[in-house]
Amino acid sequence: MRLPYSRQTVGAAEAAAVSAAVQDALLTGGPTLARFEAALADAVGATHAIAVSSGTAALHVAYLAAGVGFADEVLTSPLTFVATANAAVYCGAAPRFADVDAHGNLDPSAVAADVARHGTPRVIAPVHYAGHPAAVDAIADAAPDAVLVEDACHALGAGWRDPSGVWRRVGDGARAAMTVFSFHPVKTITTGEGGAVVTNDALLARRCRRLRDHGLVREPAELEAPDGPWSYEQHELGFNYRLTDVQAALGLVQLGRLEHFLAARRQVAEQYDRALGALAEVRPIGPAPGTRSGWHLYPVRVSAARRRHVFEALRADGIGVQVHYAPVHLQPYYRRRFATSAGDCPAAESLAREVLSLPCFPGMDGADVATVVTALARALEERPRPTARAEERTDAVHAG
Ligand SMILES: *Cc1c(COP(=O)(O)O)cnc(C)c1O
């Protein structure tokens, strides 16, 4: 693929840091991990960061720390990667899906309607789709008793102006109890695989750390029946969700380049915005006013009847367009296990029939953007047009 929808930017500085880290005394649980966590907390304006082995692991420990268990529910957006809902099922809970707004984010009025109908869920997990900040203030107001856990896997470095006019950073804990990030290579920064939970709550942070490490407690003051200086105790069932110091070394260098990555993604988005103004059939899904997107994706809508053709034509040109996402509530597993069905979230379903993610990553230049836009214009001029019926069959296309 000449231009994938996203690609990491890793250079000599990362290579040097990783090379040094593999020769350190501690390959895991060492000081580089602690430095990465401190730098991440600082970058998003949170008090605590707990780095884990993936964004999925971060969602899992965050939901557990929020108290999600059997018979609980997690309300989220259907327009997300399956992990947002899967992590709720790992806890023995059931997902609930509310519909999205024009930006692809949980619609606060849909949340309010869902809460009025089914009661307050344990957790609400807004997803900042494409890096476009969701309306977390309105969502929090719609369900004041739910714990807010943001899935910010697309949105490291994004921000929004709150109702009092103050700029907030995604992850600063202004409204959310916890915020989750992913460091998969397609995301804003990478550690290969990796993720993190950030929070301002010391108890939630301690719980996430414990869950990352088998539920073990080592602090002498926290032990129930200390037997000696060798003692540790297991207080709950946790996991091995640790991030290595080698990964943390990579993450530290990447974090140092965060502002550059964000500016480069924003520049690509602005170039698309300008160039696509001339293509009436292509409608970008942009961020809400008063927000600053992380531009993990540059999603556009084309008519459902043309999408398959456009997808195939761009792929044939070496342009890695992708569909983000087949709605989670329409996945066979969720239909079977939780009896979700078409019609549950009409706005998300309609968006999912039309959406394509265009390549968007820091290594792209203006010529790459022009290449994509030219290919898009050519594909839209071509005949024959597939029927809407044929297009519907592509709904299950997986977009990782
Ligand atoms: C990438 C992603 C995840 C999962 O992160 P991993 O690090 O791949 O486990 C969860 N939610 C969203 C919205 C994502 O984009």
Image (cartoon, rainbow, N blue to C red):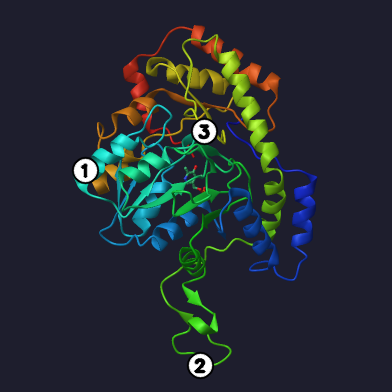
Q: Which residue is mark 2?
A: 227
Q: CA distance from mark 2 to mark 1?
A: 51 Å
Mark 3 or mark 2, whichever is nearer to me: 3
Where disc 2 sits, the SS reads loop
Q: Amino acid at mark 2?
A: Asp
The CA distance from mark 3 to mark 1 is: 28 Å
Whether the residues at callouts 3 and 2 have beta carbons within 8 Å, the answer is no
Which quadrant is the N terminus positioned in?
Answer: top right
Sooner in the amino-acid sequence: mark 2 or mark 1: 1
| Residue at 50 percent of width and 45 percent of height | 152
Of the two numbered discs 2 and 1 in the rendering, the one whose residue sits closer to the viewer: 1
Q: Is residue 76 visible?
A: no
In the rendered structure, which amino acid carries the disc numbered 1?
A: Ala
Of callouts 3 and 2, the N-terminal one: 2
Which residue position holds label 3? 291
Q: Quadrant of residue 25?
A: bottom right
Tag 1 residue: 116
